[in-house]
Amino acid sequence: MNPRSPSRPLALIAIALIAGLALVASACSSSGSSSATFQGKDIVVSNVWARESAGAADTGAVYLTIENTSGTADKLFSASVPQAFAKSASIHETVTSDGTTATTMGAGSSSMMSMKEVASVTIPANGSVTFEPGGYHIMLIGLVAPLKDGQKFDLNLGFLNGGVVKVTANVKAS
Amino acid sequence: MRRSVLALLSLGIAIALVMSACTSGTSSSSSTTSALNAPRGYKPTPVRKTDTVSLPDYATDSDGVDFSFKAAPGNLLVVFFGFLTCPDICPVTMADIAAGLEELGPTVVQHVEIAFVTVDIERDTGPRMVEYLTHFFPNSTIHALRAPDSAQLSAVTSQFGAQWQVDPHEPGAATYGVAHSGVTYVVDDRGQLVWEWPFGTTGPEVAATLKQLMDTVYPAS
């Protein structure tokens, strides 16, 4: 009789536990971000969303998170949407007149806020950049119809190394 | 044998860790929200009067009715300077204020008026501003304020301490840059500026501030 046989049930339990761990881990990560992720070459785009727009406003802003899984920095240099959806899309950053980004502006700051179009956004090696209110956003200009809660729409994002990544944005009420 | 048990133990610990990381992720975010549930911003000093200036209000009349920057008795007037084609700062601020009002409930909300002053008088019209404000504040008293010329707009913004600038452009151009203060102001029924919120003030912070202002500005009610 094999002297190591008593460990066999343990090995089975171990396999079951590993499977369990994998399940828990995957459930965990999927609950962390409710939206889908989109893959490019070494680029993962997630949490793509836009706020429902007021009828009178024909502009919108798309927010998202871009992760670079490679050891080389990448650049997002373009964003586009179908003409039937909006006239154009471009990469913008909200800035304050004293040069700081709006998200770091202190209380009582009397500086003005404005947007500037940026040529590209660097995604650091093994790092990520989050486009969020008051910072970077993809500006949608000339929306054909207002963005409605629950609506989904597609955008193409162009990366220097990562190629073109097609993503779908979810429209949220707020 | 002992090694297998150790391996099993470490697996068990790993599972526990993953699970706890998972649950703490959700619980900590909710506790962060409640920690932020305090007033934010500041009371401007010295006292500044804002009812010395007025602008046409298109909320109830498409021809515009003169509105002085002063809340109705017992109310608070929330004032923001923005423009309709602003995709980030303005909708974010409107949504945060709306979220704050939702948290406060109808008994307080009926005493909060929302005023939006356009700094883009060339592109924004009264009716479009009303549509915009109704989208964010369907249950609130709104004021859609548009100056007939830039001189009158400047008279108002300087009284508040707000700034704005429209980039030079060809007449009738569809796209041009507009810069503006991201601050939101609160005015009482005596026409005094009682609070300023910096950009990025969240819904719960808006709610907490308005609640505190109601108690301190109108202590009897």
Image (tube, helix red, strand yellow):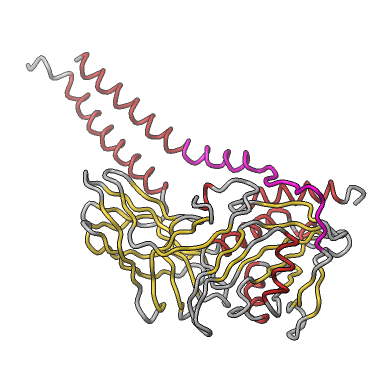
Q: Camera-side residue: B17 or B135?
A: B135
State the residue at coordinates (25%, 29%).
Answer: A13
Left or right: where B182 falls relative to B191:
left
Left or right: where A117 falls relative to A43:
right
Left or right: where B194 falls relative to B24:
right
Quadrant for the N terminus of chain B in the image: top left
A89 in relation to A38, above or below:
below
Residue A137, how many percent across, how many down? 43, 61
As for residue B46 lying within the magenta part, the answer is: yes
Left or right: where A33 falls relative to B185:
left
Residue B172, how many percent across, how many down? 52, 85
Mark count: 0
Tell which residue pokes out farthest to the right in this image.
B220
Q: Camera-side residue: B130 or A120?
A: A120
Q: Camera-side residue: B86 or A20?
A: B86
Residue A34, how many percent across, how many down? 42, 53
B134 in relation to A129, above or below:
below
As for residue A154 lying within the magenta part, the answer is: no
State the residue at coordinates (34%, 68%).
Answer: A155
State the residue at coordinates (56%, 71%).
Answer: B166
Residue A119, how many percent across, how many down? 34, 62
Q: Camera-side residue: B59 or B55?
A: B55
A22 in relation to A10, above or below:
below
Report the span colored magenta.
B24-50
Residue A173: name its quadrant. Answer: bottom right
